[in-house]
Image (spheres, grey):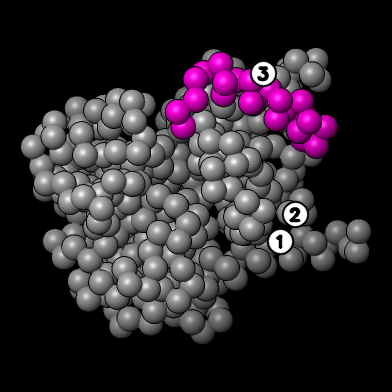
């Protein structure tokens, strides 16, 4: 999409519903998200309608190799550095990068991020999006004079990103008390903590389409076929599953619930009408995904830095940088909106701050 700020950068999505339209919106959003991180990365996105769900390791490897046999000529550490998105995790990135290395005949680590630590990946990359989202939430709450501790969260999704939110929330004394999957939602008033976090990984590996086994194992409520949008006994909603997850009907329930914070996490989880409706609700605070989920690509950028200097940073170093980036994104968004007389409008602020950064870099480089 845009390389004014650095090599094209964004995830590959492997899911059966992938089409050009989805990749276009993801690439467009990615450009401004990557700008918000203030790292030297441009914007890109890619993918395929191949879904790894239900495939053997061998099938996934062969697909990744075939994909990279064509794709390798378009990427490179200074050209375009893809990573994962939905359906592309450590396993897929490993197979993709292995084939890239085999074809180019060089250990060009920076050509892909999201690699396993043993092949030049960054510590904390898998958790980065979820951790970053909670760091961002902390800034929103701080702005309101509140703490993360004791906050209850309802969310959708318990993939990589959702899991990272659950883990960081538990670490900081908050609780994810509701989470929704493709088959319905779970209500666990004690929150997802400790061994429950490990169980989610196990459950997902066995069958990513059902979260009901969690309710069976831990004896909590499961509501089949429903989403948890509209529940009242939480402080924050965090949609962390897929685009267009929250439509007008859900937005009305969310507004009626009286819950104040709507923090998007998945890329564009809210339809436009639903988003504007919630932004118009007096007292409601809405944060946009391009800011909230930027921690993932930020740690991808940090992975590129580590690869370039042929060093591996500690978890503490990566986490400190991630925290700093998320604090900065919230601050830059807040200030950009204030400068335009829009008040505490995080949606407009993120768009303005991200757009300005890309536009300034493009204008500085002339008409090329
Ligand atoms: O949506 C996203 O920001 C990602 N899928 C991560 C992209 C990246 O390059 O790490």
Residue 321's x, y, as percent?
A: 50, 40
Q: Say which label, 2 or 3, has the lower sequence index.
A: 2
Q: Regarding mark 3 in the picture, which secondary structure is present there?
A: helix
Q: Which mark is residue 358?
A: 1
Q: Say which label, 1 or 3, has the lower sequence index.
A: 3
Q: Quadrant of residue 102?
A: top right
Measure the C-alpha gap from mark 2 to mark 1.
Answer: 8 Å
Residue 220's x, y, as percent?
A: 10, 42
Measure the C-alpha gap from mark 2 to mark 3.
Answer: 26 Å
Q: Residue under circle 3? A: 98
Q: Which residues are magenta?
A: 53-76
Q: Regarding mark 1 in the picture, which secondary structure is present there?
A: helix
Q: Nearer the viewer, residue 274 or 357?
A: 274
Q: Residue under circle 2? A: 2
Q: Nearer the viewer, residue 92 or 306?
A: 92
Measure the C-alpha gap from mark 1 to mark 3.
Answer: 32 Å
Residue 252's x, y, as percent?
A: 29, 75
Task: Check whether the beta carbons of the residues at disc 2 and disc 1 lie within 8 A of each other.
Answer: yes
Q: Say which label, 2 or 1, has the lower sequence index.
A: 2
Q: Quadrant of the C terminus?
A: bottom right
Is ligand 1 within 8 Å of the beta carbon of the residue shown at mark 3?
no
The relative height of residue 35 versus residue 93 in the rendered view (above or below) is: below
Is ligand 1 within 8 Å of the beta carbon of the residue shown at mark 2?
no
Foreground label between 2 and 1: 2
Q: Quadrant of the N terminus?
A: bottom right
Left/right placement of residue 364 relative to residue 39 reads right
Residue that appears at 46% across and 32% down: 53
């Amino acid at each position: 999409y845009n390389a004014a700020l650095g090599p094209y950068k964004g995830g590959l999505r492997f899911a059966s519903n992938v089409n050009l339209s989805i990749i276009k919106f993801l690439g467009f959003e990615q450009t401004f998200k990557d700008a918000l991180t203030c790292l030297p990365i441009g914007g890109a996105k890619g993918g395929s309608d191949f879904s790894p769900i239900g495939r053997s390791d061998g099938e996934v490897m062969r697909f990744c190799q075939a994909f990279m046999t064509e794709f390798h000529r378009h990427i490179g550490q200074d050209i375009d550095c893809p990573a994962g998105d939905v359906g592309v995790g450590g396993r897929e990135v490993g197979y993709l990068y292995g084939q890239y290395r085999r074809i180019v005949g060089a250990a060009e680590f920076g050509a892909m991020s999201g690699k396993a630590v043993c092949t030049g990946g960054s510590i904390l990359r898998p958790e980065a999006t979820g951790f970053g989202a909670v760091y961002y939430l902390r800034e929103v709450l701080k702005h309101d004079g509140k703490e993360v501790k004791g906050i209850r969260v309802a969310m959708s999704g318990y993939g990589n990103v959702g899991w990272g939110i659950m883990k960081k929330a538990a670490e900081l004394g908050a609780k994810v008390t509701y989470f929704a999957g493709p088959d319905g939602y779970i209500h666990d008033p004690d929150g997802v903590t400790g061994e429950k976090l490990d169980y989610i990984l196990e459950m997902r590996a066995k069958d990513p389409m059902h979260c009901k086994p969690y309710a069976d194992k831990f004896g909590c409520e499961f509501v089949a076929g429903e989403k948890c949008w509209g529940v009242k006994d939480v402080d924050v909603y965090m949609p962390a599953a897929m685009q267009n997850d929250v439509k007008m009907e859900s937005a009305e329930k969310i507004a009626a619930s009286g819950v104040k914070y709507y923090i998007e996490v998945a890329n564009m989880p809210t339809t436009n009408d639903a988003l504007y409706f919630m932004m118009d609700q007096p007292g409601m605070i809405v944060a946009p995904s391009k800011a909230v989920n930027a921690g993932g690509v930020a740690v991808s950028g940090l992975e590129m830095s580590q690869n370039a200097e042929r060093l591996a940073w500690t978890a503490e170093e990566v986490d400190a940088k991630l925290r700093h980036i998320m604090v900065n994104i919230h601050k830059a968004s807040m200030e950009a909106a204030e400068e335009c007389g829009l008040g505490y409008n995080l949606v407009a602020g993120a768009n303005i701050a991200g757009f300005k950064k890309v536009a300034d870099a493009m204008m500085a480089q002339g008409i090329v």
